[in-house]
Image: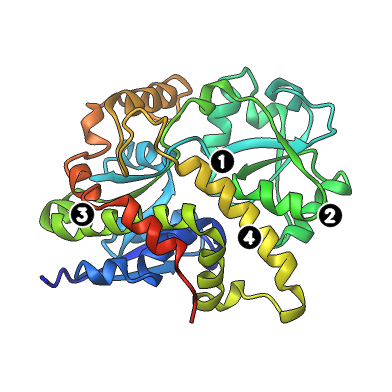
Amino acid sequence: MKALGSLKVLVPTPHVPIGYAPVLMAQSLGYAAAEGLDLQVVAAGRPQLSIQGALAGDGVGFVNSVFNYLIRDQGHPFRSFFSIARKQNRSFAVPADSPIRSLPDLKGKVIGLHYPDLLDFAYAALAAEGVNAKEDVTFVPLPGSPLDEKRMVESVRAAEVQAIWQIDHNYGLFASEGLPLRQLPAPAIDRLTPAACLYARDDLIASRPEAYAALGRSVAKATVFSMENPEGVVQLLWRDVPETRPSADNEKRAMQRDLAILEHRLRLSRIEDAEDPRWGAITLSEVDRWQQFMLSTRAIKNRRDPNEYFTDELVEEYNKFDPATVREEARHFKLN
């Protein structure tokens, strides 16, 4: 086996949470090591720090696709090479019984969020529906960390915020606290795919294609495993990320919460109805839609050849494994 050196994936959160576990599993299950790749999946803290680390060559960025276009528009040689969330994972949401039904209904309302790094995307989504984000709505930070469901839910119940701009795993977090959320239709962004990818500098992908191919193949295998045995993935996460480990008297509730979050995330990662139903794939038409949205909402200034935003050169390599074998392994997996 050829040694491929090391790669580090920079997760954009304070620690690696359950929603990002399928990527961590490439490390935890030994898939990357079996490829000769020393993989480390680490917490960067927030999206902007994941991007900064990738631009500096310190690791692989793992963030929403909007950054692909924003960063390239700034002139950085930075592109996606593996798609993770094949459907949109960012949305505006309200409590299920809220009278708010559309984005224009948000005018005059207070919207909570974590990660101001993603405000540009929120502004663009609102602008596409005729809402001036700087004049018509107010954005405020949600209390606590992005993984502190109790404080976030308290803020909504106290009517401190009437809506939230969020990532998909919040649906599971809020539901676990008895406050289910309802997604608001956002036609301009709901059709934008993929929603989250792995990114690296052009020169690094070109200089180490085997390492990046091994990373993509390992993540693909780990995703298949996660879909077959989500409970085993939660157990491995608790083993490998101490911050996620519940107390003994809270394990049952924590398992229910983490399974709800993970299964929602995995639904977004399914490839069966994707435009290119292969692991890690991104199509020119998908990139075209993203770029057109970013241009039409003035989030970016320059139209580029869509090929500048992504590479599909490694997709065949990502898919050189037998999913049935991985599913069989997952079905028989037991944590020692």
Whichever of callouts 4 and 3 sits on the residue coming sooner in the sequence is 3
Residue farthest along the right direction in this orientation: 158
The numbered dot on residue 119 is 1
Determine contact: label 2, label 4, CB under 8 Å: no
Whichever of callouts 3 and 2 sits on the residue coming sooner in the sequence is 2
Identity of the residue drawn at 75% across and 49% down: 175
What is the distance, in whole Å, between disc 1 and disc 3 at their CAs?
32 Å
Residue at mark 4: 258
Q: Residue 239: where, in percent of width, then height?
A: 53, 78
Q: Is residue 239 left or right of residue 223?
A: right
Work out whether 9 lies above or below 336: above
Query: In terms of depth relative to the viewer, which is nearer, 216 or 230?
Result: 230
Which secondary structure lies at badge 2?
helix
Within 10 angstroms of label 4, few (less than 14), some, or many (20 or more) residues?
A: many
What is the distance, in whole Å, between disc 4 and disc 1 at their CAs?
27 Å
Whichever of callouts 1 and 3 sits on the residue coming sooner in the sequence is 1
Nearer to us of marks 4 and 1 is: 4
Q: What residue type is labelled 3?
A: Ala
**Any part of residue 265 in sight:** yes
Q: Residue 91: where, in percent of width, then height?
A: 61, 36
Q: What residue type is labelled 2?
A: Glu
What is the distance, in whole Å, between disc 3 and disc 2 at their CAs?
44 Å
The numbered dot on residue 213 is 3
Within 10 angstroms of label 2, few (less than 14), some, or many (20 or more) residues?
A: some
Q: Residue 116: where, in percent of width, then height?
A: 58, 48
Work out whether 294 lies above or below 79: above
Quadrant of res 181: top right
The numbered dot on residue 154 is 2
What is the distance, in whole Å, between disc 4 and disc 3 at their CAs?
29 Å
Q: Which amino acid does label 4 sit on?
A: Asp
Nearer to us of marks 2 and 4 is: 4
What is the distance, in whole Å, between disc 2 and disc 4 at their CAs?
20 Å
